[in-house]
Image (cartoon, rainbow, N blue to C red):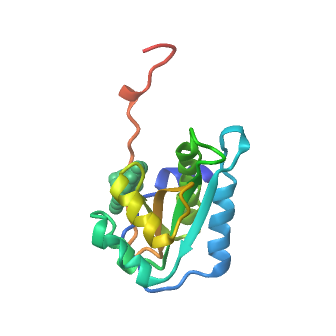
Amino acid sequence: MEAIEAILTRRSIREYTSETISPEAINDLLKAAMAAPSSHNVQPWHFIVIEDHQILDKIPETHPYATMLLQAQFAIAICGDIQVQPEVWMVDCALAAQNILLAAHAKGLGAVFVGVYPITSRMRELKDLLKLPDYILPLSLISMGYPKEPKAPANRFSSSKVHWGRW
Ligand SMILES: Cc1cc2nc3c(=O)[nH]c(=O)nc-3n(C[C@H](O)[C@H](O)[C@H](O)COP(=O)(O)O)c2cc1C
């Protein structure tokens, strides 16, 4: 898939089939994540691939918008190391997250960004569940599976959002 086509047709996918995802495909998603730009090229990200439904199924018990994890093949928790990047770790990690979303879509997978940071209760719950050290903060989870249904692209282009030269 062309990059521009992947960008313009990506949607959040929250319903999945039971088809499993190959380790090679998971590796491609992680490679895409780590190809993202980061401030001073510090790459403060860490990725926790969660396939265990004992863990995945616990998350919606406390996260109100994460029920899709119950049928996900796996999720990737995107975390940042605040020891190496205390200021903009969340920006770097968000760029890595978008790379995962686009790579997943380009490979025919369905994914959705599930927000964690900066909601302290969600961050604490995920930290406990994933046994994160204190210097590793969770930004988000990416829920992943093969899409149950195709989802139409959303055309959100609006010229009212564009300002040429000055406001
Ligand atoms: C910071 C952020 C947090 C989000 N959190 C959730 C979430 O907790 N649960 C969820 O189902 N979708 C979540 N989303 C996905 C948005 O709802 C989705 O991207 C938006 O509705 C646009 O739809 P689209 O991704 O299909 O284009 C989040 C997206 C962002 C950027």
Q: Position of residue 48 (x, y in %)?
A: 57, 69
Q: Position of residue 119 (x, y in %)?
A: 35, 51
Residue 131 or residue 20, whichever sits in front: 131
Query: Which quadrant would residue 59 be assigned to in this image?
Result: bottom left
Residue occupying the far top of the picture: 166
Residue occupying the far front of the picture: 134
Q: Position of residue 25 (x, y in %)?
A: 63, 74
In this rendering, does residue 102 appear at all? Answer: yes
Q: Position of residue 52 (x, y in %)?
A: 48, 83
Q: Quadrant of ligand 1?
A: bottom left
Residue 34 or residue 126, whichever sits in front: 126
Q: Quadrant of the N terminus?
A: bottom right
Number of numbered discs on residues: 0
In this rendering, does residue 15 appear at all? Answer: no
Q: Quadrant of the C terminus?
A: top left
Residue at (64% x, 51% y) in the render = 44
Q: Is residue 29 left or right of residue 116?
A: right
Residue at (62% x, 82% y) in the render = 22
Residue 34 or residue 153, whichever sits in front: 34
Residue at (59% x, 55% y) in the render = 99
